[in-house]
Image (cartoon, rainbow, N blue to C red):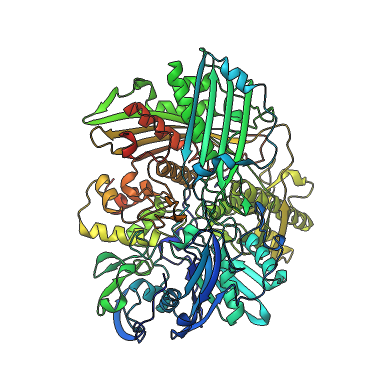
Amino acid sequence: MNYIGTPISRVDGQAKVTGQAKYAGDVNVPGLVFGAVVTSTIAKGRIKSIDTSAALKVKGVLKVLTHKNRPALPKSDQAWKDDIAPGGSPFRPLYDDKVMFSGQPVALVLAEEWETARYAASLVHVEYAAKPHITDLQAAREKAFTLKKSKKPRGDAAKAFSSAEVRHEAEYFIPTEHHNPMELFASTAIPEKRGKLTVYDKTQGVQNVHRYLCSVFKKKKGDIRVMSPFMGGGFGSGLRPQYQVVLAVMGALTLKRPVRLMLTRQQMYGLGYRPASIERLQLGAQRDGTLHAITHEAIVVTSQFEEFSSSDTEWADRLYKSPNAKFVHKLARLDVPTSCDMRAPGATTGVYGLECAMDELAVALKLDPVELRLRCYSDKDQSVNLPYTSKNLRECYQQGAKAFGWEKRNPVPRSMRDGNELVGWGMATGVWEALQMPAAARIVLGANGHAEISCATSDIGTGTYTIMAQVAADALGLPIENIGIKLGDSTLPQSPVEGGSWMAASVSHAILGVADEVRKTLFDAAKKIKGSPLSGVKFEDVTLSDGKIVSKKDPARAMTIAHVMRERRLDRIEKEKLHKFKKDEKHARNTHSAIFAEVKIDEELGVIRVTRVVNAVAAGRILNTKTARSQIMGGVVWGIGMALHEETAYDHKFGRIMNANIAEYHMPVNADIHDIEVIFVDEPDEHINPLGIKGVGEIGIVGTAAAIANAVYHATGVRVRDLPITLDKLRR
Amino acid sequence: MARSPGESLPAQGKLPVVLTINGKRAQLGVAPWTTLLDALRDHLDLTGTKKGCDHGQCGACTVLLNGRRINSCLTFAVMQDGAEITTVEGLAANGSLHPVQQAFIDHDAFQCGYCTSGQICSAVGLISEGRAKSAAEIRELMSGNICRCGAYPNIVAAIQQAMGKP
């Protein structure tokens, strides 16, 4: 293999550094109409009246749509369910007079220019009948409920905990966080001939949006095409179709003109988010550092109308041996939009709680935190009682600790200093799933030796364009310059949404599968050529390499692809195939990591800096060491934000977000980020899939916030259990 | 919050503006409330300059105004009559990338690419300011450009390469 595993630069890099990459709100077409949304100012209640007369008087305003005059929309919940909708009744914009959260769209102004639409939107006058609302998780926790019957506990965790020699019990809190991708959510809906519609949308799944729009607007499959060749950051926020795409299409169908709707940054706080969660941990251990009881209970926010749920609690079963374990995941309903997936959903929050609790247990046991984790190390996923396809977490601990210099750590809090700064070293474990989905790919190989590879997947910044080109170049034996990639178009071969870190494995094996078909066609053609050097060679023994079809056993027996195609008068070979992974019920599949963090804290002011992070990751085969490193680095930056900066702050009196902008919702900026070292631990995996791919989009964030929180404790002796760790919390 | 329209609506009449953009003279008529960012994106189809917040909080809209880096969402187009503006589309010359653009590719200094135009224009402005010497100074002086993908260490490395520093 020439390309797989190498650090080649992004194949879409040139488009991105020159401003040529077109995002959903960048599509300019003649006659474009601009939309602006009016959003609710109450969290719960009813719209008594909407007065749009002043808005309609503004020159250039074409239409104001509200629940009163919108086009017909379907009634059934089913019609509004996208591919990954949770249980419940999905939100539908401008449907009726019900207000279910602050920031809910209540009117859409359509005008000839953006500024006109925005101004007119400010003139729409809405009268509400407000009802009492609740937006505070702490106030709703008593009413939290379990969605499905919890899994049968293993043993008796409560009894084992009460008889354990060393016990740790605590509650950890993670506030609501918003994805805040840099790109504003935008859709451009363009009517085409014969009632067809092309929609450029900011999404992580063009086919999900396509099916959803066809269902909501009762269109045939061929009537709508959804495009998203570039996506300015998703992190989960673009997995489900967002309301702006419905409104843009509604506007385009109403006016029969192209409509662009770009939400404002403030309005994006009315979309999905990482739900606030309370993580309650009980760990019971013997003095030798073996665990006897684990209880993890999570209480997580969802809306009043849907039940979003991700797995916060069962990660301990994958990491730490314990004969007794109990996991409970509860949801609490608030008057807010439905929560959604956000980078490593469930694990980011659940593992934060677990890994801080493990650190506290290590302190109680007077054990090194790495040593404690090694003593509890589990070679099985205890929840299903299965070994892993591969698990090289031990190497992560060892290589990470070595690179960080962990052996020089003095375990006593406040014992390490650098001038007037306290120095803290903390560590944590990360774990995520190694998922893979059915996906299809098409290859069109031309007689000129160029191939176009297509799949309806997205590249949300993860590097999908690049790894697709690498895998295709190797599978077809062509130089990577000869490979063209098409994605982000709903008419292309089947793809799942891009999320869960499953896309690299899924699309790579789809390409391998269809490349096999191309090889078969070339082989059959080659054999038919008179005096073929490949006659008598078996199909299993030929490969594509250096532009040739060649016998693996005898490289002298070869023909160039160009020659074969010319001889057999083949202008092009076009193949498409859906790839499904073999079922393997004998193994658990996960990625793992060990994170080591250094913080320096000004002793007088409490200002915290994360000066060093080493993240050692075991994630199977790494397709591209350059872009994969960037994925892990980005995850670490997210972990730093989660630990120290990020919090969506509600004014519970009004049920409204107070910091709905990116100056007051703090995210890491360049000055916050210092040294980040990424180590990919070698992890051959023969079971998971032929290439041994596990995916790296999410593992980088998991555990990072815990490592930092543990480092803050080590520096200061103060244990802050509610994120983010701000300097005021070190002083209370 | 609903406002009353008042006696007269804000001026929607167009004013003539002449800008030199990427070396080319552009004459356009825009309403006075049109930001330079929207003039570039919606009136001149220069969509390389991105809108990430419209409030000067993110830096995605950074362009060079008479060689100085600014947030184009925080200025009206009519205020810049006669100005010279360089956007990301104007950095490559004679078919080859600007050294900062090349360095961004080499160091994988972006992922989704949405903040990239602003980062690159900001970096070009930073280098011509000549104030940043160390990595710490680059980090500080590039902190007006948010990258949610978290490419910061790679952005710093790319700028160091373009500055001719190891």
Indicate the position of residue A141 as horizontal and vertical percent values: 55, 41
What is the quadrant of residue A153 in the picture? top right
Of residues A512 and B51, the one nearer the viewer is B51
What is the quadrant of residue A526 in the picture? bottom right
**Quadrant of the drawing holding the C terminus of chain A:** top left
Q: Is residue A463 left or right of residue A407?
A: right
Q: Is residue A652 left or right of residue A82?
A: left
Residue lying at 45% horizontally and 85% vertically, measured from the top left: A57
**Res A542 seen here:** yes
Q: Is residue A184 left or right of residue B163?
A: right
Indicate the position of residue A135 as horizontal and vertical percent values: 50, 50
Indicate the position of residue A566 as horizontal and vertical percent values: 69, 64
Q: How many numbered discs, if any?
A: 0
A445 shown above or below A400: below
A528 shown above or below A53: above
Residue lying at 28% horizontally and 39% vertically, measured from the top left: A607
Residue lying at 49% horizontally and 71% vertically, measured from the top left: A126
**Res A187 seen here:** no
Of residues A89 and A549, the one nearer the viewer is A89
A654 shown above or below A169: below
Indicate the position of residue A431 as horizontal and vertical percent values: 55, 35
**Quadrant of the drawing holding the N terminus of chain A:** top right
